[in-house]
Structure formats: C-alpha cells, structure tokens
Image (cartoon, rainbow, N blue to C red):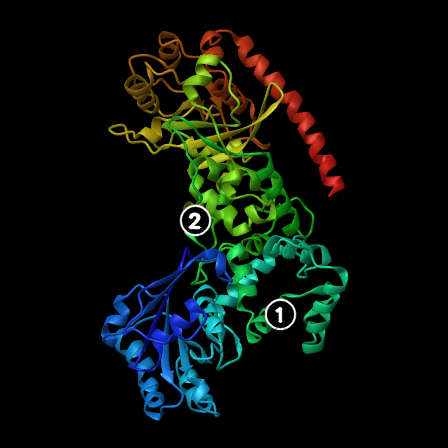
Amino acid sequence: MRKDVRILLVGEPKVGKTSLIMSLVSEEFPDEVPLRAEEITIPADVTPERVPTHIVDYSGNTHLICESTANVICIVYSVNNKKSIEKVISFPRAVINGFNCRVPLILVGNKSDLVEHSSMETILPIMNQYQDIETCVECSAKNLKNISELFYYAQKAVLHPTGPLYCPEEKELKPSCIKALTRIFKVSDLDNDGILNDNELNFFQRTCFNTPLAPQALEDVKNVVRRNMTDGVKDNGLTLKGFLFLHTLFIQRGRHETTWTVLRRFGYDDDLELTQEYLFPMIKIPPDCTTELNHNAYLFLQSVFDKHDKDRDCALSPDEVKDLFKVFPYMPWGPDVNNTVCTNDQGWITYQGYLSQWTLTTYLDVQRSLEYLGYLGYSIIYEQESQAAAMTVTRNKRIDLQKKQTQRSVFRCNVLGARGSGKSGFLQAFLGRNLQRQRQIREDHKSFYAISTTYVYGQEKYLLLHEVMPDFDFLSEADLACDVVCLVYDVNNPRSFEYCAKVYKQYFIDSKTPCVVIAAKSDLHEVRQHYSLSPHEFCRKHKLHPPQPFTCNSTDAPSKDIYTRLTTMAMYPHMAQADLKNSTFWLRASVGATVFAVLGFAMYRALLKQR
C-alpha cells in the first residue's frame, strides 16, 4: 500500500477547482475564492483508506502536469458551460498522448447546481476512448454535492485502480490479473484438488480480511456463482472459474478494493508483480555463518510435496513437478537437479531428494530460497511476517570449533582432483548410483553438486558434495570454504596423485579443515604414482588418514561408509585430528551410521504405509 496519495486538480480557469478544495476543507462554500488554494494535506485518520492525502490546486500549463508528483489527476469542467465541456474532450488527449502521463484520470463536472440536466451523455464517449480515465463525477462546490465522494474516488483510483485488473471494453479480467489470481487460488487450494472447499475458503477469507465467513455467507457466495455459471461450483467447492468470476463481479460492482486487498495480501504491487520486499525479505547473515531451513519450513515443504504427489509413491513425476511449480513465473529446477539428489528407479525425485534440493538451495543461495518460498506462499500459509521466518542462521564456525560441538545440520565437502580422477563418480555414488547408472547421464544434465542425508551418532545430517573444477593456479575462496576436503586420485593413472599432493601443500597443509585422500577406481590395477612420495607415504608424513579405497563399479549401489566418515569429520574436526590414526574413530562412525540407517529405513517404510 502507498504511503500517501497526491491528487492534482487541473482544468480551465473559472471551472471551480479552488472552490472544490475550499468546500472540502471548510465544509461550506467560500464567500471569497482565492486565485489558487495552497496545498492541502488530509491526515490518514480522517480518510477512508487511512492514507495521508495531499490535494494540489494546479493553475498552469498542461505540459508541466507530468512533471508533478501527482498520483491521480482530476480534470475539472463546468457542466453549465458548453465550451468547458468541449475543452475537457481535448484535455485527456493532451495529457495522455502528448506527454505519456501514466496516472489515473478522473473527470469532474462541477457546478451541477446550475443545471437540471447531466453531462454524462457527452462525457461517456471520452471515458470509453481512454482506459486511464477511471470514472466521472458530477458535483457542486456550492451545495457540497458529491465533494467527499469526488476525493474518495480520486484516492481509490490510486490505491485500487481499475486499469491493471479489468478491461471495460471486453468486460473481463486482464491476463496479468488472471495470472495473479490463479496463483493465489493454487496457493489457497491446500489439498490441490482444484476446488476451494469451505475450510480453504474460510482460511482464505481470514488471511485476507481477518474474519471468517459464516456458513450461510459461504453458501450465499456459492449460490451467486451457481446462478451465473455452470462450472463455477463443483462438489460444493469453488472452482478456479468461479473464483475468477467472483473477482470480476467485485470489479464490475465497483468493489475494486476487495480484489486489491487479496492481491496485496499475496505480495502483489500496482503492476501485478510480486514485490521485492515480499520475495526478498531482509535477513542478516554474519561472516562464517550458514543458512538452513528450520523445522517449520520442512513441515511446510512436506505439505507441498504431499499435495502434489498424487499417486502417493513418495516421488514426483515430471508432470507432478510441473504442477508444483505452476505458481512460479519460471521453472526453477532444470534436469541437473535429478543428478544432484536421490531419485527412484524411474529417475523421479524422491521425497528425500526433494527436501535435499531445498536444503542445497538454502545453503548455497538463501535469497533464491526466500524467493521460491515466496512463490509457494509460505508466509501466508504459515501466517508469518515473511519467509525469513523459515530460515535458521547458524552460529559462527569458529565458535563451533572452540566449543567442540555444532548445532548445524548441513555440512559441505569440497571434492578436488585432477581431470578424470573420478570426482563425478564419487558424487553420483553418494546418490546410490553405480557406474552403469552413471553412464546413462547426459553430459548437459550433469551436476557439480550432490546432496543427501547421512547418520552420525544417531543424528540425521545433510552432506553436500561439491566438485571443484581442477585449476591448480587459482582456487577461489568458495573452492576452499568447506567443512571437510576430499582429495581424489585415480589409482590406475600414474600422474593423478600429483595434483592432490600439490593442492594439499599449497592450500590445506596449515588449514584446520579435515582432509581425506580418496583412492578412486580401486577395482582397477593400482599403478605407481609419478610423485616423490607414494600416496601412503604422503599421508603418513602429513598425518593424514591412509588413502581410502573407493569404487562405484559394482552391481549394487556403492557403499556409503565413506560419506558417513566425511560427515563425522565435518561435525567433529577436533576428534578427527585427534583420532586420525586410531581406527576406532572410523569404526564408531560406521557402526553408528549402519544402525541408524536401518532404523531410518524402517521409519520410511512405516511412513509409506501411512501415506
């Protein structure tokens, strides 16, 4: 909503512009009328819309009008003067065509007390010609007829304009308005059955107008729709067509404020675009802190998943994904997402994969996550001030290191290695894909990220793997900022380990970030590396754990033990450093992960049965 409204009165001399302002302020016709009234400010508490209103008496050249800061222009003419009426015909043309002035216009026929006839017959063709003309009001400054109404309509033309919503010639809503109201309908349709039932209608009513509808009032609304269209009500609920019809009816009956109240509650501005304030609420993220979704956000995302998982298979088919994102102005997820998170055998994103992708977006780009939650209507459905309420900003990582404990749920592992060392295979194996399945991935659908859950000492955590492109000469801060580092080399390539050794010595030798060396493609013959030290000798010298053999060339899904170890090291870097040479560190992590993975699978099966 605007902070204030600025009304400009223009017109030929002697038509009564100044008298209209004086009559409004003093509530009586002035005995003496000055050449021009000073700017008047009406306080918010005495205006119908509770918005401060400034009224400006304009006496000057037409070409200066558009240089003013007016939100609405009232073009005043005398209904008892034929020449005045003729002049007003050319006035909108001069304002609109000549100076591209895109503000609402109101035609004001003053001195109606001096005639017994109306000028509307002459004025209506002008109104039909220019869409910017909101309405025409006949009034009298002398006997105070329609004075308050005039300025109310002027204020309303700014706060609740017809132009963006409705086309009078076609007598229908404009496409941009239909698009906005369709999104509002889909967000309000909590069970995604294409109908707003009584509970959903009441929630919508309470959300927009702070009051529920009585049962009889609900029936009356549906009966109005039933009388006017055959497919507006279905199974005693309001369809999208019925919803759009109601808003058309509101506008046709001059109740634009009803539709505008709904639009603004759902984040729209005067141009029917979602506002930047709605999509990107303020959120402060101090250095060395990360962003995660909180419990309520995951509950909301679960409800969104449930309402679109029509076949209840705990996965989203391509059509279900498209349906979910119909409330977005664009498709946010590309084909790479299916290679970033867990999918089922058909390649569809599973429930776990769906939550993982949201977790990844929030961690990497919190502004994007806020935007997406805005499109889905999080703050409206959960009755929060903004979707920033869905976010948790973790404490500084240095405090975690000092206290030797963390409350974070998402940990980042940067995967480095020479080209062809097996980094991509390492990422895909985390998602349960063996080499055979990986070969089916198209080159243009590949992802440099993989994210899924692991269990560490009974706690479910997200591990985010990021494949860093091999560029030894320059690694950015983002390439180095992580909780644990994986240095991957190919056991079958004699020149592969050299890259890992040089990267470690240049960037990580003095770092507190735990590092793990991965001996990838361990199913192949291991060759001697062309480096001064063997991988085992290098790890021993730098007090690193011996290289961890790894292969994704198996008939079953690759083992996830190494990923649990990585998450454990990320969570407890001090323990990793202290126990690095002690195999019990790895044993505790592996046993704990196995136990809780089994329990987690049992709970997942139980959830499937319930759904």
Q: Nearer the viewer, residue 100 or 253?
A: 253
Where does residue 210 sit, x and y in percent of width and height?
62, 53
Circle 1 crowding by C-alpha within 10 Å: few under 14, some 14–19, many from 20: some
Q: Type of residue at label 1? A: Leu
Q: Nearer the viewer, residue 459 or 212?
A: 212
Which of the 4 image quarters holds residue 353? Answer: top right
Where does residue 564 sit, x and y in percent of width and height?
54, 22
Query: Looking at the image, which residue is at 59% across and 34% down?
Result: 295
Where does residue 287 sit, x and y in percent of width and height?
37, 27
Q: Type of residue at label 2? A: Glu
Query: Looking at the image, which residue is at 66% across and 44% down?
Result: 314
Where does residue 503 sit, x and y in percent of width and height?
31, 22
SS class of the residue under badge 1?
A: helix
Which of the 4 image quarters holds residue 526? Answer: top left
Q: Which residue does the numbered mark 2 point to in the structure image?
A: 277
Query: Looking at the image, which residue is at 43% across and 37% down?
Result: 283
Q: Nearer the viewer, residue 188 or 473?
A: 188
Query: Looking at the image, which residue is at 34% across and 30% down?
Result: 479
- Whether residue 240 can be seen here: yes
Horizontally, residue 119 falls left or right of residue 249, namely left
Disc number for residue 22: none
Q: Which residue does the numbered mark 1 point to in the structure image?
A: 246
Circle 2 crowding by C-alpha within 10 Å: few under 14, some 14–19, many from 20: few
Horizontally, residue 495 falls left or right of residue 181, namely left
Residue 298 vs 95, above or below: the answer is above
Q: Nearer the viewer, residue 240 or 591?
A: 240
Marked residue nearer the N-terminal end (1 or 2): 1
Which of the 4 image quarters holds residue 433? Answer: top right
